[in-house]
Image (cartoon, coloured by chain):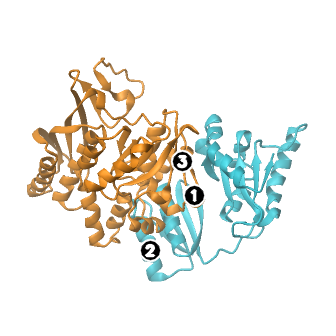
Chain colours: A orange, B cyan
Amino acid sequence: MCGIHIPTDENVLVGLERADDAGVYRVSATLALIQTVDFFTPVVDDPYWFGQIAAANALSDVYAMGGVPKTAMNLVAFPVKEMDLSILRRIIQGGLDKMSEAGVVLVGGHSIEDKELKYGLAVTGFVHPDRVLTKKNLVPGDRLVLTKPLGTGIINTAVKAGMAPPELAEKVMRLMAALNRKACEAMARFDVHACTDVTGFGLLGHLAEMVSGSGAGVRLFAKQVPVFPEALGYAAMGLIPAGAHKNREFREAMVAFHDAVDRPLRDVLFDPQTSGGLLISVGAAQAGELLKALGDAGVAPSAEIGEVLPGPEEKIRVE
Amino acid sequence: MKEIDARGLACPAPVLHTKATLDQEKPAGVRVLVDNAASQENVKRFLESQGFATVLERSAGDFVVVGRCGAAPAPAGQPAARPAAESNKIMVMCATDRIGFGDDHLGVKLMVNFLRTLKEMGPELWRLVFVNNGVKLAVDGSEVLEELKAYERAGLKILVCGTCLTHFNLLERKQVGETTNMLDIVTAMQLADKVVNL
């Protein structure tokens, strides 16, 4: 969008210039709308699971802003000449079931014919204008908390390669379909300074976005980051999605790895996630309580994975 | 040397292709052709996980991974593969592409000679870092590119300053080493037993 003038107004609390998880527009002193849209091609073979995952992924941006999703519209691209319509019904059913789990109502949608199947949602949520959580407010001393394990991109690549057992594929499917709702509700009670959700750029890519322009630096404790252990094995074998390599090339100048962090773990830290967990920056005094609240809400395995430092600015030190 | 053409295939297909060939034919050496850097990196990792020593090449727009079974015998005139030195770690930092002041032509020659001779340090040579004008030694057209690549293959970690590459508009032309940042360099200085500055 570089070079294109985008008009704005005073009620745009979060707009394009911020490149955050969603746009936020103030309606009144006590209400702001969160708007976001996301859709993609199938990440799993089962249409019902794909529908759930695509919906959970689209809803996640509202949770990452600290909001409550309220309404949604379906976005569908479907190869109607080549594929049976029953597949589309299963996808939409998966999306609908996820929306009811989130307390969201479907109010419309749009479908087009396309050679490649795509599904997702445009979601609207509510938030108090003073309670909007963006990526850009890391405070030195904060602790970083992650609410889902990493490695889904690598494991999906191994599934595509026919090298992952079905039990693992299912475990990863369930994780991708899990809403970030409980994590969002749990963090609402704490002194959270910044939040985002971990998706296509991988943990380090999203952390790099948080640290850019923050005036702070980050220390990541690589061994404490929750990961699927199988993902490390697949990464060592080169079953790595191209996106992980792109993420690394794009951000490696901001990241300093300690020698003890081996290559497979580095790959997992850059692995693009589908519908990943929330990455939360919380005041140090409350980190323990937040983790306990997440655990009580069944958001596991959440973990404290790092801390925000006064400097060096815009750098991520991985130990 | 068994040649595998995996061009036109997306990840993870090139790895599976290579795996199938290894499983069926058990070759002592393979040359895998792919058409993108991500696949090249993945095939390299797969071959290394199977005990192959690898070398990356570019050939007429294609990306190539050459793998040899077992520890690769070091090609003549190149430093032998070695374990990381634990006794004495020497970091060499080149902030220029020539040695000394006076005659620039002579300075360039001296630097080339210096980098070629550096292998005599043996396993104590631990990091080679290029900053400022020094990054020009790590881009295409550099007279010592082949030597630097040989060092890297032998396990030496070469760091090239990303800010400097960007400054000179050379980011795309870097041919050897990892793009790095000041924090990496400072950390390396702290860990090194000896730092040699040029």
Please state the horizontal and vertical placement of residue B143, each as a whole percent of the image: 75, 50
| Residue, disc 2 | B19
Of callouts 1 and 2, the N-terminal one = 2
> Where, by quadrant of the figure, is residue A66 drawn?
top left
Q: Residue at x 21, y 56 (%)?
A: A50
Query: Tag 3: Cα neighbours inside 10 Å, few (<14), some, or many (≥20)?
Result: many
Q: Please indicate, yes or no, whether residue A116 appears anywhere in the rendered image.
A: no
Query: Which residue shows up at 31% across the image and 73% down it?
Result: A165
Of all chains, the one bearing label 1 is: B
- CB under 8 Å between discs 1 and 2: no
Q: Nearer the viewer, residue B156 or A183?
A: A183
Relative placement, left or right, of B38 versus B185 is: left
Q: Quadrant of residue A10?
A: top left
Label 1: element kind: strand
Cβ–Cβ under 8 Å for marks 3 and 2: no
Check disc 1 and report the residue beneath it: B59
Q: Chain of mark 3?
A: A
